[in-house]
Amino acid sequence: MRRIPLVFLGVLLLFDASLCSAQLPNPLKKKKVDKSTDTANTAEPDKQLFDRAMDDIKHGRHDQGRLALQTLINTYPDSEYLAKAKLAIADSYFKEGGTSNTLQAIAAYKDFGVFFPFLPEAAYAQLQVAKAHYNEMPKPDRDNTQARQAEEEFQTFLQKYPNDPLAPEAQQRLREVQEVLAEGQFRVGYYYYLKGDKRAAAGRLMPLANRYPLYSKTDEALWMLGDIYEKSERKDISSTFYALIVRNYPLSNHAADATAKLKSFGAPIPQPDPKAVAWMTAEQNTPRPKESLVHRSFGALHSKPDVDMAAHNGAPNMEPESDTLSGGDILKAGAKNASLAMSSGSGSNAVVEKVRPGDPAPATSSGSTAEEVTPTTSDSTATTATTPASDSSATGAAATSSSSTSSSSSSGDSTGTTGTGVVTPDTPMDKSAAAAAPPASATSSTNADGTTTPASTDNSKESSSKKKGIKKLIPW
């Protein structure tokens, strides 16, 4: 009976001792001191605000940190930490992530570049703008707006800061962005290729091969283009694309087949470019992550594009997309941007050039200028004229020449040409000359009694330009 109170008393004593030890301060543990309010801190107030903000951002308190930095900017506009504060705000938005924060980061980085363009950090700010768009870049089969903006920003960085230490990183990111853009075009072109729509497939694959030579499937795109034109019985154009494979992609899986095609066509076989051999060898020796079966199976669940197959060597395309050629282009010798130029079987250089309505007509194979047929906007009768005269005398001469020349028209046709010029809807014409000139449809004769008899239309004298036209090289 006496042991129970003694045990209870011992428990109480131990409990009291633990409470006393908890309340007593530990002499070995130093109390955390707020350096910004410490009396021993002799730093300037702007320095204290900056240090406190950076500490908040470091520990994930982005809102508090940005508020302190904005207070520094508004209170001390002449502070030496002004540029650092602006850049830190942009970094805070970029680090926090999210779509809205990324947009804020892009605006803040661009604002820094406007106010401090000559600081060394301006290059870093420009690169961060491009990386912000890069992080928002979706898969190739999605909207490519962010990818195009990232391409533009990386190109801007490399043009403004080509010797910056961050240039190699920007160059590699640009290769990856262009890999994603090319992949999106390739998938659409491949779909039309399998579907049998030759025009749509060529319209996607041709600008792809011209703009993205470092794309991992450019050789396959060239092979499909060669097959499209071969099936369209245009072996002269088809041999151009096969020759591009042999010369620019000598280590490709299609190189041997392309060589065999050229032999069967009787076209010259070009020698492989030594630079292309060195580039493809370096790409094959570049270590790449192996894609496992699990990664391949669950790849559809990933929201980010796969850039493992992007090139790691070679200079990416630095020209804006607006300066390149579209899918509605035709093949013509001597065009600008001759990255697709290659000696074909006929000995000519076939490249891509766009022909727009109103532009000078391309030269034909015989060296003459082909005439262009342009529909009128007023009625179904074709309107024809020569080059507009610069003065009144030339205008009268043109009218006289026009009145002395017989012309023809066809009521069922909506287009037609006479003369050697091309008339577009916006062609300036003199009203007096137009009134003096007789109708282009037919000529008239005056009888002895003073009556006028209209001449009948002679279909045999129809303008030869309607028969010629522009010889389109796309056969479908």
Image (tube, helix red, strand yellow):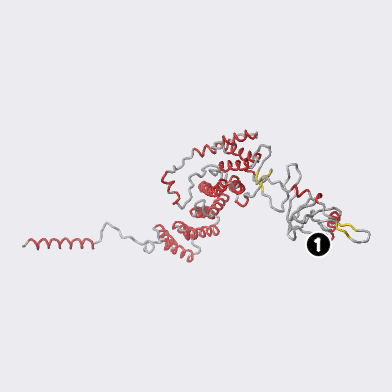
Whether residue 366 appears in this view of the structure is: yes
Q: Residue furthest bottom?
A: 75
Q: Position of residue 366 (x, y in %)?
A: 75, 41
Front in this rendered view, residue 185 or 63: 185
Indicate whether 78 appears above or below 256.
below
Q: Position of residue 246 (x, y in %)?
A: 59, 36
Front in this rendered view, residue 436 or 475: 475
Whether residue 120 appears in this view of the structure is: no
Rendered residue at 48%/40% (across/down) = 286
Q: Secondary structure at mark 1?
A: helix
Numbered marks: total: 1
Q: Position of residue 276 (x, y in %)?
A: 57, 38
Q: Which quarter of the figure has residue 447?
A: bottom right
- Crowding at dot 1, Cα within 10 Å, few <14 / some 14-19 / many 20+, comes out as few
* Left-right relation of 94 to 428: left
Indicate whether 224 appears above or below 35.
above
Q: Residue furthest right?
A: 448
Front in this rendered view, residue 136 or 351: 351
Q: Amino acid at mark 1?
A: Lys
Q: Position of residue 93 (x, y in %)?
A: 46, 59
**In which quadrant will I find the N terminus?**
bottom left
Rendered residue at 62%/34% (across/down) = 264
Q: Which residue is mark 1?
A: 431
Indicate whether 260 appears above or below 371.
above
